[in-house]
Amino acid sequence: MKKIVIANWKMNPQSLRDAEDIFKNVKKQSLKLKKVKTVICPPYVYIERLRKLSEKNNTIFLGAQDCFHKEFGAWTGKISPKMLRNIGADFVILGHSELKNLGETQNDINIKVKLALKNKLSPVICIGEEVRDNEGKYFSVIEEQLLSILKGVGSQFSEKLIIVYEPVWSVGKGAKKIISSEELVQISIFIKKLLVDKYGIEKSKKISILYGGSVNHVNAEDLIQKGCVDGFLIGRDSLVYKNFNSILSIVENKN
Ligand code: PGA
């Protein structure tokens, strides 16, 4: 199975020209990779244009950063999964902590996952605790999130599912700490075990488990070599194409 590196550009950059510039430079690098799928998740308004620039090759893909939990209708300002599919997106990030802060619930995320799959999008599902306690309660937080978000999602979709462990304390500019590879490996194995219990060994092998939260071109090597993950979801460092490209080659060259 190929590794996956996903760029979450959030509400950046401010012009289509800058978006094209980053995209073209990442595309050049992605074309050299054999073991990594590159996924760019720009703001909605750039997806269609960047999809055209990708020339439908099989190394660089487009994704959205969210979708709405309804299929169509009178929902001012919202974007449906089908619209995303129709403009060429293959992936959609769901359950990001920045959206949970705005009121998104686990139930909303569960519906979005099912609608994304119905529309042939791969859901990139973010889970992760807000704080780390000393008693290890965060394991049950992760378990509860994962199982409620995957409620009613059948094993026939295993190849499309991507789970991102993204502890809230490590995301974005306000990150309190950077995770160590020793801490990461415990969680990736825990998530794998939950997926095996739910979907069985063979099906769960097809589900990618990624890490996100302050990944950069300096710490990526250690996290990919020792963290037992299939790739990364990257915010800040994905906007600096040289840094993002160096993360891509680190993942490509994983032993
Ligand atoms: P960060 O963001 O890499 O800037 O911490 C990751 C994310 O929010 O997905």
Image (spheres, rainbow, N blue to C red):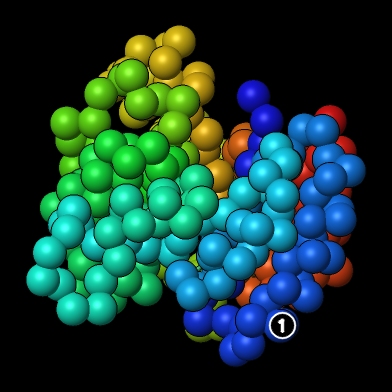
Q: Is residue 30 left or right of residue 15?
A: right
Tell me the residue that label 1 is attached to: 18
Please identify the residue farthest to the bottom as the structure is shown. Answer: 14
The answer to whether residue 93 is visible is: no
User: Which quarter is ligand 1 in?
Assistant: bottom right
Q: Is residue 210 above or below residue 8?
A: above
Q: Is residue 38 above or below residue 154?
A: below
| Callout 1: SS | helix
Residues 2 and 142: in front is 2
Q: Is residue 72 above or below residue 115?
A: below
- Name the amino acid, label 1: Asp
User: In the picture, which quadrant includes the N terminus?
Assistant: top right
Residues 227 and 243: in front is 243
Q: Is residue 224 left or right of residue 229?
A: right
The answer to whether residue 2 is visible is: yes
Q: Is residue 169 left or right of residue 54?
A: left
Q: Is residue 9 left or right of residue 151?
A: right
Q: Within 10 Å of the Cα at label 1, are there few (<14), some (14-19), or many (20+) other Cα atoms?
A: few
Report if the beta carbon of the residue with label 1 is closer than 8 angstroms to ligand 1.
Answer: no
Can you give x and y, in whole percent of width and height, for residue 137 in the image?
Answer: 29, 51
Can you give x and y, in whole percent of width and height, for residue 43 in the image?
Answer: 50, 73
Q: Residue at x 56, y 50 (%)?
A: 211
**Looking at the image, how many numbered discs can be counted on the residues?**
1
Q: Quadrant of residue 237?
A: bottom right
User: In the picture, which quadrant includes the C terminus?
Assistant: top right
Can you give x and y, in whole percent of width and height, for residue 54 in the image?
Answer: 70, 54
Can you give x and y, in whole percent of width and height, for residue 152 in the image?
Answer: 17, 31
Residues 63 and 73: in front is 73
Q: Quadrant of residue 218?
A: bottom right
Q: Residue at x 61, y 57 (%)?
A: 51
Q: Residue at x 18, y 48 (%)?
A: 111
Q: Residue at x 89, y 43 (%)?
A: 32
